Image (cartoon, rainbow, N blue to C red):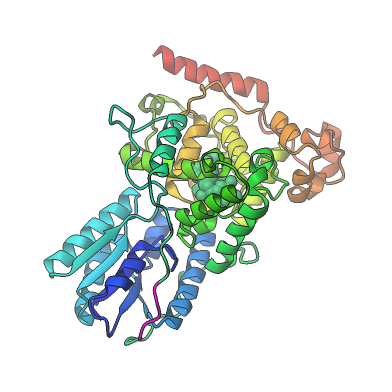
Amino acid sequence: IEDIVWLRNDLRWSDNPALHFASLEAHSKSTGIAVLVTPTPVQWQEHNESDAKMGLRAGLIKQLAKQLGELGIPLHIVETERFQGLPDAITQFCLQHDIKHVWFNNDLPVHEKQRDQAVTEHLDRQGIATHRYDADLIVAKPVFSQQGTPFKVFTPFFKRWASILAEQDATPLSAPEKQAAPLSNTLADFDWEKPFREDLWPADQDIAKQRLWQFCHHKEGHYQEDRDYPIKPATSTLSPYLALGALGPRQCLEAIYYTCHENARRWQDSIWLKELAWRDFYRQLMTHFPTVSMNRPFKAETDALIWRDNEREFIAWCEGKTGFPIVDAAMRQLNQTGWMHNRLRMITASFFTKLLFADWRRGEAYFMNKLIDGEFAANNGGWQWSASTGCDAAPYFRVFNPTRQSETYDKNGDFIRRFVPELAKLDAKSIHDPTPEQRKRCAYPAPIVDYKPARLAAIAAFDDLKKT
Ligand code: FAD
């Protein structure tokens, strides 16, 4: 075998350019290609990856091994603790098996880029060629303004992004064809395998694809009206699959094009497409502004903020015991399922950074540690947006009022009832902010922070920053 495809966060057999082109252009037609995956469990832990995400990843790799095995493509595993062990380990593996070509799709985060560069250089020294593709974004080429600079605000980015997309052929690529299998799988049980909510996210890319098409068929058209209500199953919940690449963004695009065409709508007006554009946006931001990957705020001046960082409040927030029912329901959803609805991510992050005035980096790390869809660019972007340290057109004095948010987006309190069962018997009015007597009766804590003064203190801290 001369060609091997190195899979990372692109654990899919359809619309995977490296896999597709390697299979088409394999140098030895008689033996075909093989696939390589390289677990780096210590590195993942250092990146705060959650058990849930590692569990789903292990499940997806096993499914891939099975599926590719049926096509006659063997899957091999080379495990090292960290990225830094990979250049040697992969080169050794290639030399051992006489592999002359390594195919992979580019990863965008900074450590991953460094890893890929180091592996490429090592292989090159041994005369092993690398073939690299872009698979992670809908619009892969840099989206720049007319002045040739990266966008810092989403809306103009989206306009330009959509105009590039209109010119682009985004047809997904086919899965590799069946081939003869000269090597057998080296797949064994992984010691980094972890439990996750398989009932909610089966480790199965066919199911992910089915869910995509069902979502586009039944829900995409109502997404704009319904997406902000956490009790409604109105968003796709595909983020765990997108984060690990079990589903590619262009596969989503194909489903949007089809649905819009069927319903005589312009794809440019799809609000769901806009969310996928946010995904591209944050990834491009991470690429063009490296400081965000160095634990620094996007707006450098906000590094001078002195966060309050109260330990007791931090623990209450993590455990869903803040005394704000919507915040607690959201945090318990995260802790129990590994996922949180987008509106709730905004509410809990705003609560954390503005009302508790806690350092957004701690919240970002906690989310990453729990989320099954944890993904650096979107998580960092979301946290910095909420903390007003990031790229956000809205001013820093936008501070979400959790009780008002709760009354608007969980009007009847049904989402709260699901995750904060001690409040289940309260009526739709008082459940958003129970009286002291009700709290006592339900064994539910008093609010850990007073909204009005906390809001004013946060605004004052940003005002001071402006003055200095
Ligand atoms: P849908 O509404 O169906 O959207 C479809 C897809 O678009 C999502 O699966 C996701 O891939 C992408 N997407 C949607 N909204 C955003 C967004 N605002 N930014 C970037 N991509 C988006 N998303 C992650 O994938 N991983 C994270 O670690 C993450 N952390 C976040 C942290 C905070 C504080 C905030 C405010 C948002 C975060 N998001 C993150 C974005 C968003 O909340 C999730 O993508 C979304 O809730 C996933 O649910 P869904 O698949 O049903 O989304």
Total marks in image: 0
> Secondary structure of the magenta portion, mostly?
loop
Determine whether, in the image, residue 462 is placed left or right of residue 90: right
Range covered by the magenta-colored residues: 176-180
Q: Quadrant of residue 214?
A: bottom right
Residue 85 x, y percent position in the rendering? 27, 65
Residue at image position (37%, 31%) is: 151
Residue 32 x, y percent position in the rendering? 30, 80
User: Which is more toward the observer, 6 or 194?
Assistant: 6
Residue 309 x, y percent position in the rendering? 52, 34
Residue furthest to the top in view is 467
Residue 204 in view here:
no
Determine whether, in the image, residue 27 is placed left or right of residue 391: left
User: Which is more toward the observer, 68 or 61?
Assistant: 68
Q: Quadrant of residue 28?
A: bottom left
Residue 244 in view here:
yes
Determine whether, in the image, residue 122 is placed left or right of residue 31: left
Residue at image position (43%, 69%) is: 13
Residue at image position (75%, 44%) is: 416
